[in-house]
Image (spheres, grey):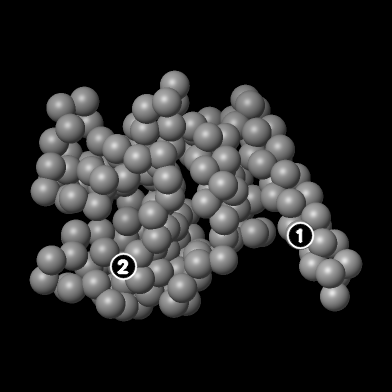
Amino acid sequence: IAYKQVNATLETELTEQSMLARIGQIIGSELELDSVFAEVSTELSTLIDFDVVFVTTLNKEKTRLRNIFCAGKSAEHFTNRQWSGVTDKNVAQILNSTHPHRVDLVVIDSKKAPSQFKLARELGLKSALMIPLISEGIPFAILNLRSSKRHAYDNVSDDFLQRIGEQIA
């Protein structure tokens, strides 16, 4: 049993390293940003379950958030959405952190939920994952994943998610 567990762990680590290397190749390519994001999202889907993936950026004044580079089944609902950044405490918390954040969309209070979570719930999505994208030690955007499966991101290690955020940034 111990041999199987060690072997499974090593296999998972090899698969994760391979995916990170592939993302690095995609980002280093000469493709336009939209094409790069489409390829990165395809690569991510091989190891992480999601229905939609998108990047959220904050303007220089830190007053408005905007979704960019959306891919997946519900992408059209998230593309170019904008909202006030100062009122969304979850986003502010993530942009002040280097750690990924998971949210069970089923149990959040819909009256207090940020608009992006309300939209996800309306679309039948049950899990949210936010990974800060960090450049020179400073989070500047968020890689967001949403899934129709509850607890979809519980078994993905924080270390691996942080490495994805660093590689994409």
Judge by depth and name the residue closer to the eye, 25 or 9: 9
Picture quadrant where residue 106 is located: bottom left
Q: Position of residue 90 (x, y in %)?
A: 24, 52
| Residue farthest toward the top in the current orientation of the protein | 136
Q: Secondary structure at mark 2?
A: helix
Q: Mark 2, residues whose alpha carbon is within 10 Å: few (<14), some, or many (≥20)?
A: many
- Taking the spot 46% from the left edge, 73% from the top edge, the residue there is 151
User: Visible in this render: residue 105?
Assistant: yes
Q: Amino acid at mark 2?
A: Ala
Which mark's residue is nearer the viewer, 2 or 1?
1
Q: Position of residue 133 (x, y in %)?
A: 43, 37
- Taking the spot 37% from the left edge, 27% from the top edge, the residue there is 138
| Residue farthest toward the front in the current orientation of the protein | 2
In the rendered image of this protein, does residue 124 appear above or below residue 37? below
In the rendered image of this protein, does residue 74 appear above or below residue 144? below
User: Visible in this render: residue 123?
Assistant: no
Q: Quadrant of the N terminus?
A: bottom right
Residue occupied by mark 2: 120
The disc placed on residue 9 is 1
Of the image marks 2 and 1, the number of the one nearer the N terminus: 1
In the rendered image of this protein, does residue 87 appear above or below residue 153? above
Q: Secondary structure at mark 1?
A: helix
Q: Amino acid at mark 1?
A: Thr
Using residue 63 as the reference point, say whether residue 16 is left or right of it: right
Q: Position of residue 105 (x, y in %)?
A: 32, 71
Q: CA distance from mark 2 to mark 1?
A: 33 Å
Picture quadrant where residue 48 is located: bottom right
- Taking the spot 17% from the left edge, 50% from the top edge, the residue there is 88
- Taking the spot 36% from the left edge, 58% from the top edge, the residue there is 76
Using residue 15 as the reference point, say whether residue 93 is left or right of it: left
Disc 2 and disc 1 in contact, CB within 8 angstroms: no
